Image (cartoon, helix red, strand yellow):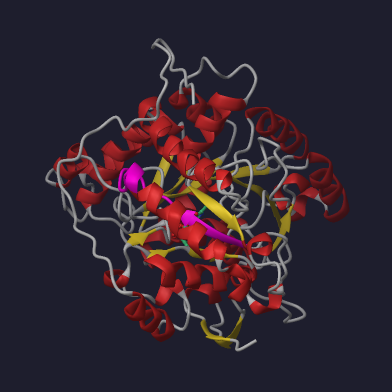
Amino acid sequence: MHLKEKNMTLVKTWAEPYKIKMVEPVFMTTKAQRKNAIKEAGYNTFLLKSADVYIDLLTDSGTSAMSDRQWAGLMMGDEAYAGSRNYYNLEETINKYYSYKYVVPTHQGRGAEHILSQILISEGDYVPGNMYFTTTKLHQELAGGKFVDVIVDEAHDPENMFPFKGNVNLERLEVLINKVGADKIPYVSIATTVNMAGGQPISLANLKALRELTNKYGIKIIHDMTRVAENAFMIQQKEEGCKDKTVAEIVYEICSLTDGATMSAKKDAMVNIGGFLAVNDPDIHEKAQNMVVVYEGLHTYGGMAGRDMEALAIGITESVQDAHIQARVGQVHYLGNKLQKKGIPIVKPIGTHGVFLDAKKFLPHISQDKFPAQTLAAELYIESGIRAMERGIVSAGRNKKTGEHNHPNLELVRLTIPRRVYTQAHMDVIVESVYNVYKRKNAIKGMEMIYEPKYLRFFQARFKKLKK
Ligand code: P61
């Protein structure tokens, strides 16, 4: 990959812009141990013990490595109940890099989603968005709203090479506005990047056009900015006219085009816990400050310790550095390209936070009702102790009205790469392991769900292997 940085020479490699100062040992188990562990976990990788995992690709959420600066930041924690200096530093940092005026810290992303949904959504409202995310949609529904997917069609096709699969289909959105009325749409929900589509970015041009359209109807844009720096990097690399901008400049521009944001700081910002709600409207801010004291904590810490807010402020600063994000996404692309060379079906183009295996193509003999992605994730664990995550029919849940399974087009297994944690050699082991499963794919059979929780079922559901 040839990557250019503003005011710097052409960078020909994604080599990490850091060296390793501390390590955490990982251990390999035997196949017999893994077979037993996954059976006990009901063939659900969320229910495995981390000690039984060799390379953990379940998520990039809260699993990244903090820098020495961030660890030093923990020592600067001001744990005052009210008015911690770390809060003011965080607010200033968010204002500087993300443009938003007011900040309410929460324990993580869904805490912010809860508060924002309750404030903005009324019973019977519609919330259009660029593909659903599990927790975001659930909070929209719990507040009385109905999520409407207005992402471009390309996003539902794993083979389509469109570079901005996170874009909104503006015609479809306008049809919805005219059908239900702008007063029934409290905001458009825009994620950077789109997790469930395979970590796919939205373009700056599409976001600008969306801003124009929503301005015309007086509708807000709320930004799920969980992986905004990764999205900005893809804009820098792929969007016309953006190659001379820094990632930090693009991040700022994206945020400036929106009215407010929810953030799971556990991703881009590389902290183990934390999140926030950020807005420009003083009325929404006042309401959020009032709600946060009910559900999270005082408005100057929400759900976070002072030290965690300090580590977050430092993490935000690091997350928008070109050298960092180039290495982060470079590693994901290294893995994706190697898998592709082996003929493994993956979502294309390769996204930013992980490589997504296309389970429908990997296991074409297993029908979606027999959970091919869930099955593939379990098999990969048995093969080599690698833990991945189902992102298909189990994650999509049931239709609220009919009670039937939702059948998403995308039936995927996510190999999620934590930031600054694994090496190139680990990536090679992952490729080898996936390929070994691929070679024996015809012998793999589907599964049956034997326990299904009411909310976000994929976290705790249990399965049984089918005999045929
Ligand atoms: C993940 F299986 N993501 O990707 P919280 N928005 C977006 C997210 O990616 C996100 C949240 C909001 C996780 C953790 C996770 O179905 C699942 O800080 C784009 O986790 O509350 C979280 O942020 C929520 C895994 C969440 C899941 C929900 O692994």
Residue drawn at x 29%, y 29% is: 17
Residue drawn at x 60%, y 89% is: 467
Front residue (pair 36, 6): 36
Q: Quick one: quadrant of the C terminus?
A: bottom right
Q: Position of residue 266 (x, y in %)?
A: 37, 51
Establish if 28 lies above or below 32: above
Q: Is residue 413 magenta?
A: yes
Furthest residue to the front?
439
Residue 314 found in image quarter = top left
Left/right placement of residue 134 relative to residue 265 reads right
Establish if 5 lies above or below 87: above
Establish if 466 lies above or below 71: below
Furthest residue to the left?
75
Looking at the rendering, the stretch of residues picked out in magenta corresponds to 412-425
Total labels: the figure holds 0
Q: Position of residue 29 (x, y in %)?
A: 28, 71
Left/right placement of residue 335 relative to residue 161 reads left
Residue drawn at x 70%, y 39% is: 161
Left/right placement of residue 369 relative to residue 226 reads right
Residue 83 visible, this angle? yes
Residue drawn at x 41%, y 79% is: 38
Residue 323 found in image quarter = top left
Left/right placement of residue 387 relative to residue 212 reads left
Q: Position of residue 202 (x, y in %)?
A: 63, 37
Q: Position of residue 20 (x, y in %)?
A: 19, 40
Front residue (pair 86, 388): 388
Q: Is residue 90 magenta?
A: no
